[in-house]
Each structure stands twice: as C-alpha cells, then as structure tokens.
C-alpha cells in the first residue's frame, strides 16, 4: 500500500509505503530525526524519496535534501506521528477487508502468507497477513505471529506474540500523549528460538531484528527496533527496551532490564536482576541496580 506525499506536502511528488529508522533507512519510507540524534541524517546518503521530519536547526547536506523530502518543525516526533497515522489508516483499511482462513490443522492463516517445507504448526496459532516463515519451523499452540519475516529452523513456544504493536508515544504542546503508529516489521534469522509467553514488538519506525541463533527463554519482552545480534541468549523474565543493540554472544541473566537505546558489547554478561542504564563494553560482566562492572 502506497501513500502519495503530495497530498500533504505539494512540494514533494513521490510515494511512501512504510516507515524506517534513520539509523537504517530504506527508500520510500517516512522517518523523524531530533537534534539529539541529528548525526543520523548522514545515513540517508545514497537513499531517495524518504519523507524526513526534522527538528529545526538540523543541517542537511544538499545532495540528501535534493533526493528526499525534508520537513522542518519544532516537534518532529509529533508531526511524524500525525502523518504516520494517515499511512497506517490506509494500510489497515485494506488489511481489515482481508479474511483469515481456519486450516484443517486448526490454526488461522492470513492473506499472502508463505510457510516453508517441513513445518509443524499446532492448533490455536494465528499467522497474520504477509508473514513469511522459512523451512522446518515449529510453532506451538497459542502463538500469534504478525508483521514478520522469519528464517528457517524456527521454534516458537506456546502463547508467544511476535509483531505486537510497539508502545511509543509522542506528546503535543498541551502534554497530551499520542501513540505513534507502528509501521515496522520483525525480522528473524535462522535457528532462532522464542520462549513461551514472549512478546517481540514491531518497530514504530523501523524493524526489530533478531539475527541467527538468538535464543529467548520464557516471559521475555523485546522492545521496538531492538537489534539482537548472532547467538544472543536471554533468560527468563528479562526486559529489553526499544532501540537496544546487543552484539554477538551477549547474555542477559534472569529478570535483568536494559534501558532504551543502550548498546551491549560483544560477549558481555548481564547478571541476574541487573538494571542496565549505560552502555556495556565488550567481554565485560555487570551486575546490580544500577548495573556496575563486576570485579572478579
């Protein structure tokens, strides 16, 4: 589904079909950038026909400005939310007309779904529209999968939810809060395991990514636009907030919590119950509340 930007901004004559995070932009998408992360504007080098809501005062190189639509404003998150609501309404209007089919095996499947060979899906599962799942998947009863592209050898345990709407708010001049429509996806690599009663949120303006061989225990929350690199292991009850990046082979202990926009370095260990509020360097161990470097 495409939306003509010209309807709202006559100076721009292109179509957009979704959203992307400025850290990993895609052509023909919408995004916002605040002064706090204004360096992300340079990621648009080589991209085109993106509609960018920018906080006043951000410098935009001419070559980026010429190939994309730049809208300067005081509150780019709020203006993005208002525009995204129009795009989301158009997408949802189409999807609401689509029907789910109850299969002979007892699970529900949406339109345009692709499921690989040798996959096992139990009764009570719901697979949403446009989902792609690779070969050799095992999806157990009660799981709900939407807005996702999933690799091979996937295991999803009971009552997990993949692709639930993210919890992201914008605030207007009066302090009223508005939900930012979630227009992203969940991208899952090969050999990934999702524990029972997990939830993995879609991105508000980009993708939530779980790379190959990520393993999640039960009752884990993965926030919007989180990026879990290869062989990440997360144990029961852990909370990973939005935009967190976990590099290869990192480990979260039981009931640990990671604040939004934190980066955990390669092969780091987060102790049981730790509350992480600052970046963690590679090959280190932290524990406590707030988490501090653990001295052996």
Image (cartoon, grey):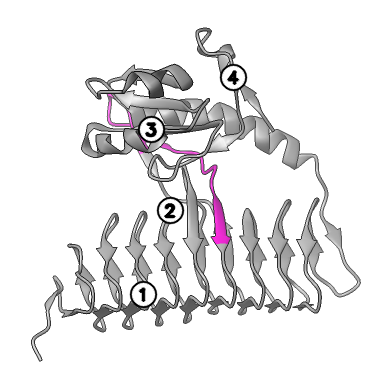
User: How far apart are the alpha carbons under marks 4 and 1?
Assistant: 42 Å
In the figure, 23 relative to 220: above or below?
above
Q: Nearer the viewer, mark 1 or mark 3?
A: 3
Question: Which is more N-terminal, label 3 or label 4?
Answer: 4
Is 171 above or below relative to 165?
above
Q: Which mark is residue 108?
A: none
Q: Which residues are magenta?
A: 170-187
> Looking at the image, which residue is at 43% across and 42% down?
21
**Residue pointed to by mark 3:** 32
Q: Residues within 10 Å of mark 2 (few under 14, many from 20)?
A: many
Give the label on residue 14, or none: 4
Residue 110 percent across, percent down from the top left: 78, 55
Front-most of residues 190 and 257: 190
Cα distance in 3D space between marks 1 and 2: 17 Å
Q: Secondary structure at mark 2?
A: loop
- Residue 245 pos. (x, y %): 34, 61
Residue 113 vs residue 86, the one in the foreground: 113
Q: Determine which residue is flagged by label 1.
A: 238
Viewer-side residue, 285 vs 197: 285
């Amino acid at each position: 589904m495409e939306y003509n930007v010209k309807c709202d901004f006559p100076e721009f004559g292109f179509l957009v079909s979704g959203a992307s995070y400025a850290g990993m932009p895609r052509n023909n998408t919408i995004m916002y950038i605040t002064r706090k992360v204004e360096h992300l504007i340079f990621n648009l080098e080589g991209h085109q026909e993106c509609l960018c809501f920018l906080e006043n005062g951000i410098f935009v190189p001419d070559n980026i400005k010429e190939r994309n639509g730049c809208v300067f404003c005081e509150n780019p998150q709020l203006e993005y939310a208002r525009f995204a609501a129009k795009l989301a309404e158009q997408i949802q209007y189409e999807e609401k007309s689509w029907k789910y089919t109850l299969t002979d095996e007892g699970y529900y499947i949406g339109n345009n779904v692709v499921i690989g060979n040798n996959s096992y899906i139990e009764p009570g599962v719901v697979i949403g529209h446009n989902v792609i799942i690779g070969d050799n998947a095992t999806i157990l009863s009660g799981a709900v999968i939407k807005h996702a592209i999933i690799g091979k050898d996937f295991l999803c345990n009971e009552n997990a939810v993949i692709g639930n709407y993210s919890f992201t708010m914008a605030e207007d001049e009066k302090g009223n809060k508005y939900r930012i429509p979630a227009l992203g996806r969940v991208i899952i690599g090969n050999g990934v395991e999702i524990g029972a009663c997990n939830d993995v949120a879609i991105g508000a303006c980009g993708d939530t990514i779980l790379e190959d061989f990520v393993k999640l225990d039960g009752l884990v929350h993965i926030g919007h636009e989180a990026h879990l690199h290869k062989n990440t292991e997360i144990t029961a009850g852990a909370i990973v907030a939005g935009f967190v990046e976990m590099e290869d082979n990192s480990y979260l202990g039981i009931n640990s919590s990671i604040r939004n926009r934190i980066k955990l370095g390669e092969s780091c260990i987060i102790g049981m119950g730790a509350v992480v509020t600052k970046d963690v360097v590679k090959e280190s161990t932290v524990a406590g509340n707030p988490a501090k470097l653990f001295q052996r």
